[in-house]
Amino acid sequence: MKKYIVFTIILSITLLSCGCWNRREPENLAIVLAIAFDIEKETNMYNTIAQIANPLAMGATDISQGSAGKEKTFLTLSAKGELPYQAMRNLVNNATREFFWSHNRVVLFSEELARYGIYPTMDMFGRDRQLRTIAQVVVVDGNLKALMEAEFPLEETGARGLDRQIITIRKERSIFPIKPLNELYSTLAQPGRDMFIGRITVPENIEKGAGPSRIGGGAMFHRDRMVGWAEDEHAKGWAYATGRAFRSTLIIKDPMDDKTPISIEVTNIKNNKRLIIDTSGGVYIELKIYAEGRIQDFPVHRNLEIESDYTKSLEQRTAQNIRSTIQSTIDLSRELNSDIIGFGNLIYRKQPKLWEEIGDRWYEVFKDINIDIKVDMNINRTGFTASPIETKKMR
């Protein structure tokens, strides 16, 4: 009896095991590394451009040579459709392999599509099982197709080059907001907060080897539509105000002669936003920034003791620089009706009853609401040199 039961179990497992009924062999797949979306204003047709890995070239090229091999390690295909998903599916008309989307690194939107509205494309990404929402998102200022076809000297593929350039520029300068798709979903769903997506500027002579792109600044949105560009300083102000700055270098003038430039590298940046209602019922927002810094370029001879009056003057000037940068970002946000820092969301979370009263007209309120910016700057390092050599002794 026991033998019969064991035999029945083994037979059932064997019959129920489905095996690899839906397997897809790697050699039959086209690996998508980057995808871009554009729209034709005249017809409202979506245009999709996919960058696909070329395994034949990758296998024949020395990795240390990057993309300098005889054959490109990737190729680009494009197709049109009435909707984003249809345009993606129409790509197969130009390919001999099934598309595999899970390795996609970056998603690029043209300026035209960003101003038209990106929600339909975002919605498609949230529904498809292969499309990864951890991909980095950027808005392209310039020739989208040329950027998708551009090669990066130190990288195998253009998609990998874009991905690494985005991460590097964010860590080194904090002038580019890194936003994966899943974060954009969250932002779009939050009342009182607008999307801010990084900007890539494509040079006009990119095809002549002028370099693939310039990364910095961002596209400011009102709901799902782009309303304007933010420059590098505005992106830096956004990073300070939201606690997303990794490090940045500021240039200030020497407090003693008011003309010699000094560079301060700002690190360990933290922020705190508070909604305050005073005794008269007035509402204002307090934005506090805490930051540390170290002196990098110091071409003058001064007393650099950490607690000296001179060092305190450097801290005050650095704090004023940060304050002005944040204020310029707020001014642009008010001008474009794009609350990228999320002051409205602070009211929504802290005072929901107040938000019910002003939510529908938030952008009108936003233009006049008082935002008090306070910066606590602490220069606690001077590098490996405490005090520089006097200029007279060097010459």
Image: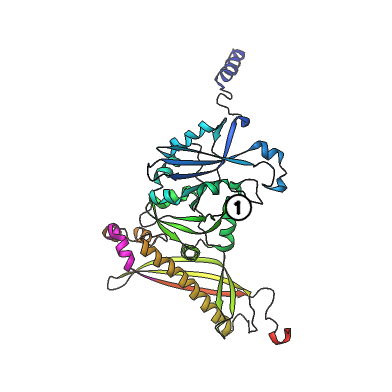
Residue at 30 percent across and 63 percent down: it is 364
Q: Secondary structure at mark 1?
A: helix
x and y, in percent, of residue 293 in the image? 58, 71
Q: Is residue 115 left or right of residue 180?
A: left
x and y, in percent, of residue 107 in the image? 50, 46
Q: Is residue 118 left or right of residue 161?
A: left
Residue at 31 percent across and 60 percent down: it is 362
Can you say whether 178 is above or below 22 in the image? Answer: below
| Residue 19 falls in image quadrant | top right
Can you say whether 276 is above or below 110 in the image? Answer: below
Q: Quadrant of the C terminus?
A: bottom right
Near mark 1 (Cα within 10 A), the count class, few <14, some 14-19 or many ≥20, is few
Magenta run includes residue 72: no
Q: Is residue 3 left or right of residue 327?
A: right
Out of 172 and 383, give the one closest to the viewer: 172
Can you say whether 54 is above or below 258 in the image? Answer: above
x and y, in percent, of residue 63 in the image? 71, 45
Residue at 58 percent across and 75 percent down: it is 379
Residue at 47 percent across and 48 percent down: it is 109
Magenta run includes residue 369: yes
Q: Which residue is mark 1?
A: 208
> Of the residues shown, which amino acid type is indicated by label 1?
Lys
Residue range in magenta is 358-371
Characterize the magenta stretch by its predominant secondary structure. helix
